[in-house]
Image (cartoon, grey):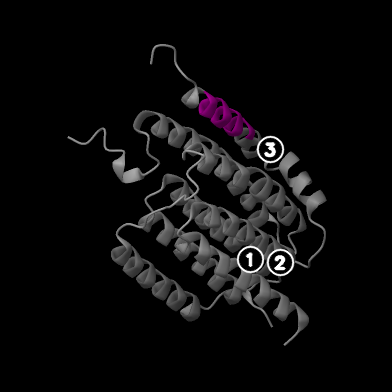
Amino acid sequence: MIGIQHYLVVSALLFVLGILGVLTRRNAVNVLMGIELILNSANLNLVAFSRYGAGNLQGQLFAVFVIVIAASEVAVALAIILTLYRLRRTPNLDEADVLKG
Amino acid sequence: MTASAVVFYIFAAITVGSAAVVVLARSLIYSAFALLFTFFGVAGLYVLLGADFLAASQLLIYVGGILVLLLFGVMLTHKIYELDLRSEVTQFLPGFLIAVGLVMSLLFAIARTQWKVGPGRAPLPTTRDIGLQFMGPWLLPFEASSVLLLVALIGAAMIVRRRPGA
């Protein structure tokens, strides 16, 4: 029998892989992919609690909002990355040090 | 082991395995395509959880929208003739240690907690109910998120616009 713990474990693994991607990649687009993994893991948790919890739809409604936020976040983040690339000719985050004193 | 358990383990393996490829692959293109399989795996898990509308929107929005945007990002931030789209790894050891500590504590918490399982929701079609909820008690957040999408898209277009003389 698949219980809620199974989904929580999958979601935890997704979350940690996303954190690892955010922490260790230099490329900004790759960091963005890590953030997408984190958002997906949160969504999986919400839907799992919606299924096994009180039995209403609120978790799924929240997941829809998370998807909306993810879409707008990717659009704005890619705009920033493209501007960074135009200014500095690099997609690497650690070379974006214009503000460093 | 029941059939649904087998399907769950297959989708979970697809999701976690391709997420690992996303994070660890040397090439950006490999990462992007592994992300495709992660999104598919998560959509399959949504189907198993009885969230049919969310599974469909996951495929439409993540695979059809966000992944294509990310691929645009990959293509536009590299010279296109550079075949080798490397993405270097930095500070791998501290990141890895943080990730291992985090996964250990999360798994410990999941195993130790007594999860309060409610009556649960039977896997019925959800689209109609979600629509009714959005048009009823959740109308204000729904409208606010539509305004947020509009603002984000206009803002993105403004940010990447080439300013004359800049």
Query: Mark 2 and mark 1 in contact (Cβ < 8 Å)?
Result: yes
Residue at 47% from the left image edge and 19% from the top image edge: B162
Disc 1 is placed on an element classified as helix
Residue B33, image x, y percentages: 60, 56
Query: In the image, is residue B149 part of the stretch drawn in magenta?
Result: yes
Distance in Å between CA atoms under marks 3 and 2? 25 Å
Residue B24, image x, y percentages: 45, 63
The chain letter for the residue carrying disc 3 is B
Point out which mark residue A48 bears.
1
Is circle 3 on the same chain as circle 1? no
Q: Amino acid at mark 2?
A: Leu
Point out which mark residue B139 bears.
3
Query: Mark 2 and mark 3 in contact (Cβ < 8 Å)?
Result: no
Callout in the foreground (3, 2): 2
Residue at 37% from the left image edge and 50% from the top image edge: A26
The residue that label 2 is drawn on is: B49
Q: Which residues are magenta?
A: B146-157
Q: Is residue B32 left or right of residue B166?
A: right
The chain letter for the residue carrying disc 2 is B
Q: Tell me, yes or no, if residue B97 can be seen here.
A: yes
Disc 2 is placed on an element classified as loop
Q: Tell me, yes or no, if residue B136 can be seen here.
A: no
Query: Mark 1 and mark 3 in contact (Cβ < 8 Å)?
Result: no
The answer to which image quadrant residue B142 occupies is top right
Q: How many marks?
A: 3
Q: Amino acid at mark 3?
A: Leu
Distance in Å between CA atoms under marks 1 and 2? 7 Å
Residue B54, image x, y percentages: 71, 54
Residue A15, image x, y percentages: 48, 62
Distance in Å between CA atoms under marks 3 and 1? 24 Å
Is circle 1 on the same chain as circle 2? no
Alpha-carbon neighbours of circle 1 within 10 Å: few (<14), some, or many (≥20)?
many
